[in-house]
Structure formats: structure tokens, C-alpha cells
């Protein structure tokens, strides 16, 4: 018999809340780590999970710690647009997209 999980997230749910809930339901932390290893991101991030309690509510607090030491320097839109050619994409632009692009390019 297939099993399912239904969330009633009337005000949303974050990824760390979702992972914490799944770990509380019995999904092993190691399983998440194995699946994330399939992304081949090396040591760019680490998934941590620990039990916690806040205002009488207990659960697992999952967290993704990102290694920012190799993060590229911040670039602004004009720099990116000068680096990348969008001519092959512009052939498929709708009229609304052309208007938006022209408004954004206007100085």
C-alpha cells in the first residue's frame, strides 16, 4: 500500500522545516546526505540536524551551512549582460518581455 504525507502549510514551510519534519517522521539524516551527494557539489555545503525545543514545542532543527569561502564576487546586471549574449534568446521574446527588457535597459 502506498503511503503519503499531507502538509497543511497555510502560512508556508521552509526547506529546513520540511527536512526537520521528515527526519522526525523517520527518514534518516544519512539518507538526505546520500541524496545530496548526488548533486556533486563537494564540500560547498553541509546539512546538519539536531533536536531542539522552543516554547514547549520539540522537533528536529535542520540547517544547511554554506561554505562561502569560494563564492564568486558580486556582479551587477550590466556586467552580466555585457558578458552574456542574449541574442539567441531574444528571438523567442514575447511583446511583453521586449517591453520589460527595454524598460530595464533604459537609463
Image: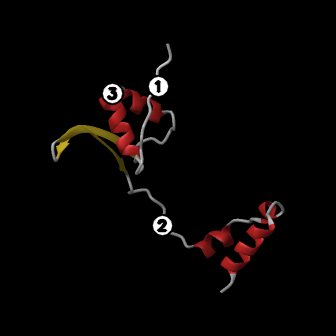
Give 2 or 45, whichever is nearer the viewer. 2
User: Mark 3 or 1, which is nearer the eye?
Assistant: 1
Q: Secondary structure at mark 1?
A: loop
Q: In the orientation shown, which residue stands out farthest toward the bottom?
A: 107
Q: Earlier in the sequence, mark 2 or mark 3?
A: 3
Q: Quadrant of residue 106?
A: bottom right
* Distance Cα–Cα, label 2 vs label 3: 40 Å
Q: Which of the two discs, 2 and 3, sits closer to the camera?
A: 3
From the viewer's side, name the closer residue of 47 and 7. Answer: 7
Residue 1 in the image: state x and y as whole percent: 49, 13
The residue pinned by badge 3 equals: 25
Q: Nearer the viewer, mark 2 or mark 1?
A: 1
Q: Quadrant of the C terminus?
A: bottom right
- Residue indicated by mark 1: 4
Q: Residue at 74%, 66% (x, y): give it.
A: 85
Which quadrant of the view contains residue 76?
A: bottom right
Residue that label 2 marks: 73
Find the distance from the CA under tag 3 to the CA under tag 1.
12 Å
Q: Residue 7 at what x, y percent from top left?
A: 42, 37
Classify 55 as above or below 79: above
Judge from the rendering whether residue 44 lies leftward or rightward of residue 56; answer left or right. Answer: right
Counting from the top left corner in percent of width and height, residue 47 is at 35, 40
Amino acid at each position: 500500500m502506498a503511503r503519503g504525507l499531507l502538509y497543511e502549510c497555510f502560512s508556508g514551510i521552509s526547506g529546513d522545516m520540511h527536512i526537520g519534519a521528515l527526519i522526525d517522521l523517520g527518514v534518516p539524516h544519512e539518507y538526505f546526505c546520500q541524496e545530496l551527494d548526488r548533486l556533486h557539489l563537494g564540500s560547498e555545503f553541509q546539512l546538519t540536524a539536531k533536536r531542539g525545543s522552543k516554547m514547549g514545542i520539540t522537533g528536529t532543527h535542520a540547517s544547511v551551512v554554506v561554505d562561502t569561502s569560494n563564492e564568486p564576487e558580486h556582479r551587477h546586471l550590466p556586467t552580466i549582460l555585457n558578458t552574456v549574449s542574449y541574442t539567441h534568446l531574444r528571438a523567442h521574446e514575447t511583446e511583453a518581455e521586449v517591453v520589460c527588457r527595454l524598460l530595464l535597459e533604459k537609463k
